[in-house]
Image: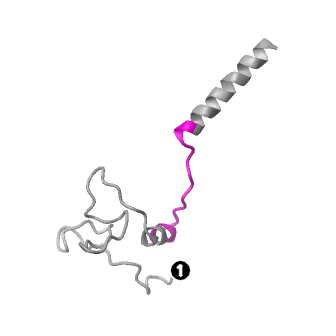
Amino acid sequence: MVVDRGVTAIAPFATGVEHGDGNQASHWEYRRRNKFGIMDPSGHFGEGSPITSNDLIALDVIGWDAVPEPSAVHLLDGGLLALALIRHRRMV
């Protein structure tokens, strides 16, 4: 997708709480049948939403890049390996 200064609409935005549709304007417009992804204003605390192509395009446009973070298991494995190496060096 080419970013063309807003000429091509990705998905409709909410129009605001005060004088709009009642949803936060930084989210996608709420529609019962169409779930636009993680920026859907109808989501509830703890409810999961799939990340859609609309979300990825919007995040790319604002300069956000997805960088996977190491999981807790990988961090634990790395820490245990480091401790084992330290213990091994002390024994030698």
Tag 1: Cα neighbours inside 10 Å, few (<14), some, or many (≥20)? few
In percent of width and height, residue 92 lies at 82, 14
**Quarter of the image where one finds residue 74:** top right
User: In the image, what residue occupies the spot 69% across and 22% down?
Assistant: 84
In this picture, residue 25 sits left or right of residue 1: left
Q: Secondary structure at mark 1?
A: loop
User: 58 or 36: which is nearer to us?
Assistant: 36
Q: Is residue 72 magenta?
A: yes
User: In the image, what residue occupies the spot 43% across and 63% down?
Assistant: 51
Question: What secondary structure predominates along the stretch shown in magenta?
Answer: loop
**Quarter of the image where one finds residue 7:** bottom left
User: In the image, what residue occupies the spot 29% across and 69% down?
Assistant: 25
Which portion, as a residue range, is magenta?
58-73
Q: In the figure, 31 relative to 80: above or below?
A: below
What's the colour scheme? one colour
Q: In the figure, 92 relative to 18: above or below?
A: above
Mark 1 lies on residue: 1
In percent of width and height, residue 85 lies at 73, 24
In percent of width and height, residue 28 lies at 32, 71
* Identity, as a three-letter code, of the amino acid under mark 1: Met
**Quarter of the image where one finds residue 88:** top right
**Residue located farthest toward the right when viewing the structure as drawn:** 92
Q: Is residue 67 magenta?
A: yes
